[in-house]
Image (tube, coloured by chain):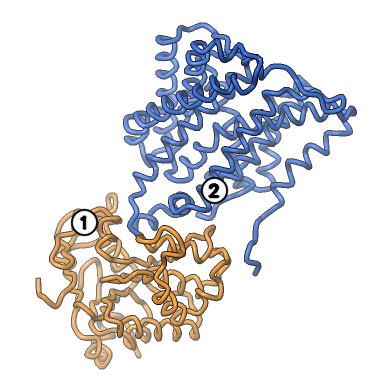
Chain colours: A orange, B blue
Amino acid sequence: MSAQNLMTLEGVHTHIGAYHILHGVDLRVPRGQLTMLLGRNGAGKTTTLRTIMGLWKASRGRITFNGQDITALATPQIAALKVAYVPETMGIFADLTVRENMLLAARSAKHLGQLDEQRLQWIFQLFPAVEKFWAHPAGKLSGGQKQMLAVARAIVEPRELLIIDEPSKGLAPAIINNMIDAFAQLKASGVTILLVEQNFNFAKRLGDTVAVMDNGVVVHAGGMKELAEDEALQHSLLGLAI
Amino acid sequence: MKAFDFDWKPLALVPLLALLVLPFIGSPSTWLTLTVAGLAMGMIIFIIASGLTLVFGLMDVLNFGHGVFIALGAFVATSVLGAMGDYTGSGSLWVNLMAVLPAMVVAMLVAAAVGLAFERFIVRPVYGNHLKQILITMGGMIIGEELIKVIWGPLQIPLPLPEGMRGSMFLGDAAIEKYRLLAVIVGVLVFAGLLWTLTRTKIGLLIRAGVQDREMVESLGYPIKSLFIGVFVVGSALAGLGGVMWGLYQQNVIPQIGAQVNVLIFIVLIIGGLGSTTGALIGALLVGLMANYTGFLVPKAALFSNIALMMAILLWRPQGVYALSK
């Protein structure tokens, strides 16, 4: 493993029941950078994230994180390595309040008084809705507010890696801009981020490196800047005509 | 958006049902007697059902063998109380409690230990398959009943109320059985304890979160299986406690005592919304009241009345009165 890579996937295959979804994914996630995972619907992006988190087990291949083989680890063990995951569905506990959602994500805190106040203030500055609706049931939040809570929950404690699945999906442009600002600040704080995205404009404003998936394999990996500047490559990889 | 957006309508069903039947019963004292009896029965059913609703909500496990823990609790109570005749024979309630409380503790410990084994060997191999869960847990209950017959014999065993718990108190003309009041108090204490745990502790938060999205709880770093085993064991212990209460309520115990209550428990869970503790309380109180009112007004309809109640509730709220967000 290269010292610059926080996480690597080598020849990862995943089966879900009778279906063979990932066909040997090779992916490198450089430390301290924001890696975009792009691809059409059904390319295998979400399956890749879920396989990393151990929610679906890799049937072949190897996943290493910080030099440790995590392929066979259970999801809670992977999370304990300071890996946070925000699924496409956001995974908000709707019947719990916003503060209860935050408290749950802080594994070291038994009650609200044990949350890191300074970090909490930083999160409130990134996502003001979290502070505004602190005592409200999370299920009553709008889609954008839920997404903010999902990301805020993921960073309530310092993390080595943030894995986020389609954070801009279904959000209004104003909220998307808010999310982009928040991710830029998160990136500047030094956290490594792996982000699945369908919105190429979102992706090119944030990504340092990019991997493009198709039919369960990574078909392109490189710098985001190069892909953003090469319209022909975008068209061939993503079917985009920008 | 209000900060505390609690849905109060289902809570109103309990007083509403009680008030609706008052004109049909006629006599306020009879109504009060029946209402307290119904609440007591409801509270015992709630104690039994509270663990089961969390087990279903947390792991999607349909445990039709829950009745065996009820039976076990009741039979353990016959042994413990039988051995403490000096205490149960006293006319003092406090002396009686010195026998009943140990009986409850021992019943809960035995039911918890058997629950641990039940989860490991019967439930765990069939996660994710409802049909297998129903078949194997019912099979487990049958085996459990047979083992109870081996230990305590196949015949009915009397479980008389301790002296100080017998008889009634009078509120005006209304006779209120002392034991039923005690059952209400125990039920309220169990509900308060559960509510406090679920809303004021981190483990409670985890259980509530796990009921909604267990995969996300795992992604946050918490092993849901350990949590589930804990809930299953506590649920079994509560069923054991409910078994003691139910056995004393019936004043005799048979190996099938759990199976007899099983149907009522599932009616309660369906009315309450699977996975909801407050829903289970509402469902249990409604079932207890309905059984007592119809038993008095239309005895022939008593068996059918709770099914009718469940149907009416489901027409109003198809997921139960407190459906959880999944």
Q: Residue B305: in sight, yes or no?
A: yes
- Is B80 situated left or right of A211 in this image? right
Secondary structure at badge 1 equals: strand
User: Mark 2 = which residue?
Assistant: B196
Q: Name the amino acid, label 1.
A: Ala
Chain identifier of the residue bearing label 2 in the image: B
Residue A138 on image: x %, y %: 53, 65
Q: Name the amino acid, label 2.
A: Trp
Tell me: residue B238, above or below residue B178.
below
- Give neighbour class at mark 1: few <14, some 14-19, many 20+ (Cα, 10 Å): many
Quarter occupied by residue B234: top left
Residue B191 on image: x %, y %: 58, 41
**Measured Cα–Cα span from mark 2 to mark 1:** 41 Å
Q: What residue occupies the far bottom of the structure in this picture?
A: A229
Q: Which mark is residue B65?
A: none
Secondary structure at badge 2 equals: helix
* Towards the viewer: B22 or B84: B84
Residue A98 on image: x %, y %: 51, 66
Q: Residue B297: in sight, yes or no?
A: no
Q: Which residue lies at the image location 70% right of the left edge and 23% below the top edge?
A: B178
User: Mark 1 = which residue?
Assistant: A58
Quarter occupied by residue A59: bottom left
Q: Which residue lies at the image location 24% right of the left edge and 90% below the top edge?
A: A225
Q: Which residue lies at the image location 65% right of the left edge and 69% below the top edge?
A: B1
- Is B235 situated left or right of A229 in this image? right
Camera-nearest label, 2 or 1: 2
Q: Which residue lies at the image location 73% right of the left edge and 44% below the top edge?
A: B13
